[in-house]
Amino acid sequence: MTQKERMKEGRLYDPNDGAIMREQTARAHYLKEYNALGQGDEARMRELMEQMFAEVGENCYIQPPFYANRAGEHVHLGSNVYANFNLTLVDDGHIYIGDKTMIAPNVTITTATHPVLPALRERGIQYNVDVHIGKNVWIGAGVIILPGVTIGDNAVIGAGAVVTRDIPANVVAFGVPCRVMRPIGERDETYYYKDREIDL
């Protein structure tokens, strides 16, 4: 079994394998061009996203700069996904992001990790576990989402959270480590911030 086959199956593998590194290096030009673009370049940005990502729905926008190990090769975006500055995607494994999800600045989503056993880490060995983010999720600034996490539809992840375990749908969660603080409920249908009423 090749190292790339091991990578795809979620097994322990050597990420510095020659074939893996050649593929990764060959995709670096996408990020260089994308990150040189900005407002007014949306058409070219869309073309690049379609080339970079495994899947990209309609009306997706990622504000440059953004970073990805494999330039988005293993990233699956639904429709109407928005991400602000400095999104970092460690996409050695697959990252699935559902429709209408919004991502604030400086968010990191990582699928790659390393074994606890020191002897394996000395050899540079790693493994990947996919991340699944549902529809209509709001991920606050500076959030870190670790390998293997699933976040349910409509969840809100508060700024600065470190998401180490699954978060269910329809909740507000934050903290280090991230934990559910409350469900999204009736009060949220009336107030959008403290005592400010929804008026539209």
Image (cartoon, rainbow, N blue to C red):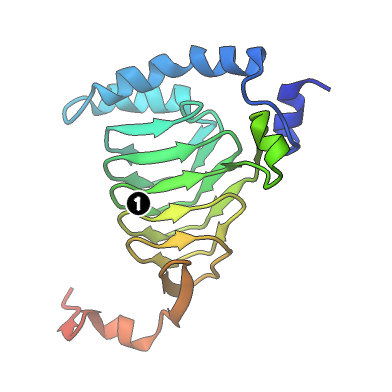
Tell me if residue 26 comes above or below residue 141 in the rendering.
Answer: above
Determine which residue is flagged by label 1: 103
Can the viewer see residue 125 in this picture?
yes
**On-image quarter of the C terminus:** bottom left
Q: Residue furthest right?
A: 1
The answer to whether residue 22 is left or right of residue 13 is: left
| Callout 1 crowding tier (Cα within 10 Å): few <14, some 14–19, many ≥20 | many
Q: Residue at x 48, y 30 (%)?
A: 72
Whole-percent x, y for residue 103 in the image: 35, 51
Name the amino acid, label 1: Ile
Q: Residue at x 54, y 46 (%)?
A: 96
**On-image quarter of the N terminus:** top right
Tell me if residue 19 comes above or below residue 43 in the rendering.
Answer: above
Instruction: Give 64 or 127, whichever is nearer the viewer.
Output: 127
Q: Residue at x 49, y 29 (%)?
A: 69
Q: Residue 128 sits in which quadrant?
A: top right
Whole-percent x, y for residue 51 in the image: 46, 22
Q: Residue 130 sits in which quadrant?
A: top right
Tell me if residue 164 comes above or below residue 52 in the rendering.
Answer: below
Tell me if residue 45 comes above or below residue 82 in the rendering.
Answer: above
Can the viewer see residue 58 in this picture?
no
Is disc 1 placed on a helix, strand or loop?
Answer: strand
